[in-house]
Image (cartoon, grey):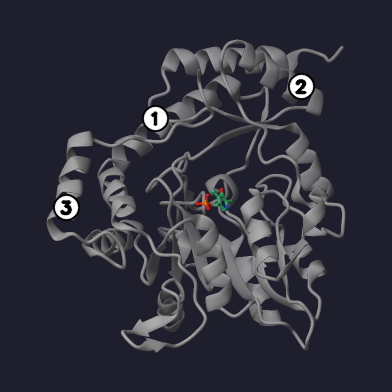
Amino acid sequence: MIPVTKPYLPNRNKLNEYIDSIYECHWLTNNGPLVQELSRRLEEYLGVKNLLLVSNGTLALQIAYRALGINEPVKGKQAEAITTPFTFIATASSLKWDGIQPVFADIDPQTWCLAPENIKAAITPQTRAIVPVHVFGNACDVEAIDTVAQKHKLKVIYDASHAFGVNYKGKSLLEHGDASTLSFHATKLFHTGEGGAIVFKRKEDLDRAKKMINFGITGPETIEELGINAKMNELQAAMGLCVLDEMEGNMNARAEIWANYERKLAGSVQFQKISENISYNSAYFPVVLDTEQKAIEIEKKLKEIGVWARRYFYPSLETVRFLNGQNQQPVSHDIASRILCLPIYCTLAISDQDKISKIVKEQSVKTSE
Ligand SMILES: *Cc1c(COP(=O)(O)O)cnc(C)c1O
């Protein structure tokens, strides 16, 4: 069976050494030595400051909302955040879970990221924040979004779950916005089994968030504010340290697979337009077919040979009932209905890549009956 993605398993002996060190110092969680080490090394690797490790990418979003105060009501009414309908459910459901109404704005038909002009049109007196997603690791139009945010005094929290290691104009993409969040779930490019991180623009927001992830406790006998448990533990950090050591090989292998697919499929399908001035991380390989029927047909044909391509992100989130999405989002709806993500992970054999490309290519040119 060929899954759409496969968790990266690092060198076992190295992981054992870290586990030995955990046994030696008997420290399992609460900002232990491995969490501190991973935090330092990630700041260095990504070229960022004010990075906070947390237990998963969903809590990373929720802690960022709270640290920046965007869950506070506006004149007694529920706060709103403008976000994209073309993303994993957690971006929007985390807002809702924290009492913030997600308000959808449509995406750009080429980059599939939130279109700045649609953000402007969705602003109301209740809007506190913009929560864009660097979808599939492609950079949002960060400069235009910054301009809108400044003009309307809105906070910006990027869901950068897919954007690990992506640079924009030679610097980390994660530097944009008041905060950017990462997911280190097993299926993500860089992972800690489960885990995540927040990169804050300002140190004071980082300091507030540090308290929040440990129940608001600030000393043996002091509880300063409302908090929750969102700490990363030492076993997660051990996995992360091992995976980080092997990132270069992992990224190179993916880049080759990405280029091979692109070469084989050029002209047959629509690709995501990668934003200018970025170094891309080859995290996903999405293709868009002419019709929904073709996407479904190809998914089926691939399954017959044991390949699990996935229709994501489908459905477009304005159709998810409990989110109370207000408006139709025609671009997102259209792309979501015709998209398919092809398998990409560093041990995917070239013969399998070719088998997959061949089926996609054959089926994409076939006229529907
Ligand atoms: C994976 C993902 C999340 C959630 O991260 P978890 O670590 O699984 O909680 C949030 N947003 C996006 C866009 C994701 O892909």
Residue at mark 3: 23
Above or below 218: residue 178: above
Q: Nearer the viewer, mark 3 or mark 1?
A: 3
The three-letter amino acid code for the residue at tag 3 is Tyr
Above or below 138: residue 155: below
Single out the residue that lies furthest toward the front: 221
Above or below 293: residue 106: below
Residue at x 33% of width, y 58% of height: 233
- Apparent side of residue 192 relative to residue 188 in the rendered image (left or right): left
Nearer-N-terminus badge (1/2): 2
Q: Position of residue 8 (x, y in %)?
A: 37, 35
Q: Which image quadrant for residue 255?
A: top left
Q: Is residue 160 visible?
A: no
Q: Position of residue 302 (x, y in %)?
A: 62, 16
Helix, strand or loop at disc 1?
A: loop
The three-letter amino acid code for the residue at tag 1 is Cys
Q: Residues within 10 Å of mark 3 (few under 14, many from 20)?
A: few
Residue at mark 1: 346
